Image (cartoon, grey):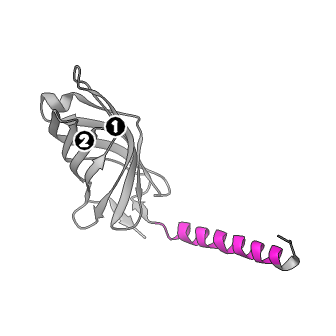
Amino acid sequence: MQVTPITIKFTINFVLAALGLIGCHQAQAARIEPAGSAFTAQGPISFSKGALISADCTIKVAGKVAADGTSVNIDKVAFDGGLKCSRVEAINLPWILIAKDTKSGSMSKISVDVHAFGLGGKCGPSTAVGTWDNATGKLQAANVPIGDDCIIKTVSIKMPPDFKVVE
């Protein structure tokens, strides 16, 4: 390929246009409010590991919205609801929540350690893509694989009333 001034000019313009699109996309990204705030939330979760371990629990999370609202660090996670739930331990914290838009988002670094002799083990890390609803304040996901033989069947976390996603 012969490099000419026209080729160089086209390449530079293409790169600048691509950077402009990236910058525009980042400027219009969804934000989580209230920025900089700490919160706690909870809701039902149904989880399985392999064919023999299944647990319906309450997941309790605590975290903090980043100062610029671009993400949330989930620093504490607990599972309540009986013996099976007490055997599930959140690991690889913080988990990171990012809003894609006012209707959806993702939580990354999800990992758990299931303490069950002969059947337990670590699951994840994985990223769950789910839905968000400002009206109900619920963050929901279903059928999320977190490792080879672990799955979050359903989860619905009710966030505090002032927790919102805006664009």
- Residue 165: name its quadrant: bottom left
Residue 84 is inside the magenta segment: no
> Which residue type does callout 2 highlight?
Lys
Q: Position of residue 136 (x, y in %)?
A: 21, 63
Residue position for label 1: 76
Q: Residue 75, relative to residue 38: is it above or below? A: above
Q: Mark 1, residues whose alpha carbon is within 10 Å: few (<14), some, or many (≥20)?
A: some
The residue where tag 2 is placed is 60
Residue 83 occupies which quadrant of the picture? top left
- Magenta region: 7-29
Contact, mark 2 vs mark 1 (Cβ under 8 Å): yes
Q: Nearer the viewer, residue 135 or 97?
A: 97
Q: CA distance from mark 2 to mark 1?
A: 8 Å
Closer to the camera, 73 or 9?
9
Q: Secondary structure at mark 2?
A: strand
Quadrant of residue 103 within the rendered picture: bottom left
Q: From this view, report whether residue 37 is shown above or below residue 49.
A: below
Task: Assess disc 2: are there few (<14), some (14-19) or many (≥20) residues with their C-alpha within 10 Å of its C-alpha.
Answer: some
Among the two numbered marks 2 and 1 on one chain, the one whose residue lies closer to the N terminus: 2
Image quadrant for the N terminus? bottom right
Q: Residue at x 57, y 72 (%)?
A: 24
Identify the residue at horizontal 49%, vertical 53% (top origin): 67
x and y percentages locating residue 141 in the rendered image: 26, 55
Q: Which label was assigned to residue 61?
A: none
